Amino acid sequence: MPPSLRVKVHHGVERAIGDKLVEQVGGCDLFVTTYALANRDREHLERVHWRRVVLDEAQFVKNPATKQSQAVRSFVSARRIALTGTPVENRLTELWSIMDFLNPGYLGPAATFRRRFAVPIERYHDEQKAEQLRSLVRPFVLRRHKGDPSIKVELPEKFESREYCHLTREQASLYESCVARMLKDVDESSGMHRRGLVLSSLIKLKQICNHPAQALKDFDPDAGTPPDPARSGKCVRILEMLDEIVASDEKALIFTQYRQMGHLLSLMLRHEFGRDILFLHGGTPQGGREQMIEQFQEMGAERPVMILSLKAGGVGLNLTAASHVFHFDRWWNPAVENQATDRAYRIGQDKNVQVHKFVVRGTLEERIDEMIESKTQLAHSIVGSGERWLTELSTDDLRSILTLRDDAVDDIS
C-alpha cells in the first residue's frame, strides 16, 4: 500500500459515528470496516456518497436477505467492485446476489433468475442456459487462475492426495448402529421431519468417523487429558503423518468442520509432541486471531501445527509458513475446501504444498468422495450445499451409500 495513502480503520468500541464519522471519511482515501459493522452502523455509513465500494470476500453477501447484504447494497456509490475466490459456493443464486450488488437488476429479479437459469442449470444440467449465463456475466469478470502463466511462475507446485483410513472396531459398531437406527426412523417419517433425521444422522456418522469421543461426548474437555487416539483410524494416521512433518521442521494446517474435534485434536497433538498447538475457531477474539497468525508464521518449529475450524479459518488468512494442509473431515464442497487450502497455497508461498484429504474406507466418506470426483457438475451444483442434498435421497439410495463395506475396519484394531 502506498505510504501516501490515508487509511482509516472503522472498528472497535471507540469508532466514530454520526458527524464525526462523516468527517473522518472526508479526511482519508481508504475507509476499511467489516460486514458486521456495515450493518450495525448502516445509518451513519449511508450518509456518505462513496466514490467506490469494494467488497472483499464477497461471498459474505451471497444471501441477499441477510442484514449485512442489505446494508452494503444500500450505500450510494458511483462504482462497485466485488472480490471473491468462490462466486458460487452452493447455489447459482449466490452469483445472482453478487451480480445484483454490482449491477442492480442486470440479471433480473431473483425469482426470474431462478426460473430462467438456476433451475435449468442445477436441476437439468442445461448447457445452453449455462453458456447463456456465462456470456451475460463474462464482461464484468476479471478472473485470475493460479494456473495462469503470469501467476504460475510465482507459485510452487501443489500436490493433492487422498489419505485412506480405516475404522476401529469401536467406530464400526457405532457406525452400523447409527445407520440401522436412521434407516428404520426415516421409513416411518416424511417431509421436514425426515430431512432432519437424515441430516442429524449424517452429522453423527461423520463424527463417528472422526473419533468415537466426538460422537459419544465421553471425555472431559477440562481434564487436559486427551481421549485415546487409538480409538480412531483417522487420529492414528494423522499422528503418524505429523510425526514426520514435525521431525522435518515443516509446518501444517489442519481443517476440521467441527470445533469440538479441533479441541480434541489440539489435546492429542499437544500430548503427543509436547509443543504448543494453535487452534483458531469462531470464538477466537480478533486480537487472539492476529497473535496466532503471527506466531505460526514467525515462530518456526515451536509452533508446527495450526488447527482451524473450516468456517472461521477458511478465508481471509495468509498462512504461507505451512507446506502441508490436512482436511481432516470433509465439507463435501470443493469450492470451500479449495478456499481453505489457499490459506497456504497463495502468492508468497515458496515451498511445494502437500494437500491431504482424509477419507475413511467403506463408509459414506468414500462413497461421497467418489461421487464428487466422478460428477464434477454435481459437485458444483448439488453437492455444494454440504450434506443437505442427501436428505432428498430415497431410503434405498441412503442404504446403498451409508451401509458399511467389509473393508472399512482395520483388521488389527
Image (cartoon, rainbow, N blue to C red):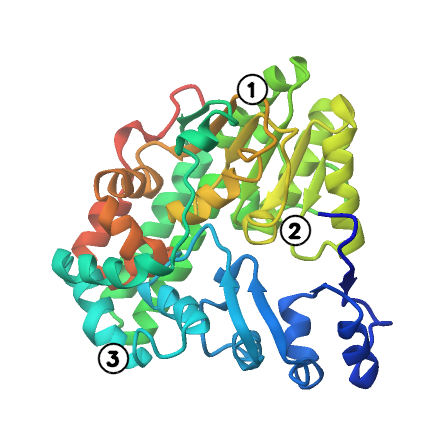
Q: Quadrant of residue 77?
A: bottom right
Q: State which tag comes first along the sequence, 1 or 3.
A: 3
Residue 73 image offset from top left, x and y in percent = 52, 77
Which numbered disc covers residue 158?
none
Q: State which tag comes first along the sequence, 2 or 1.
A: 1
Residue 302 image offset from top left, x and y in percent = 78, 25
Which numbered disc covers residue 112?
3
Please tell me which residue is depicted at 44% across the width and 35% down the height of the picture.
146
Q: CA distance from mark 2 to mark 1?
A: 24 Å
Up the image or down, 134 lies above or below 11; here it is above
Quadrant including the C terminus:
top left
Residues 225 and 359: in front is 359
The residue that label 1 is drawn on is 240
Q: Is residue 265 visible?
A: yes
Q: Is residue 208 visible?
A: no
Residue 233 image offset from top left, x and y in percent = 47, 29
Q: Quadrant of residue 120?
A: bottom left
Residues 305 and 45: in front is 45
Which numbered disc covers residue 281?
2
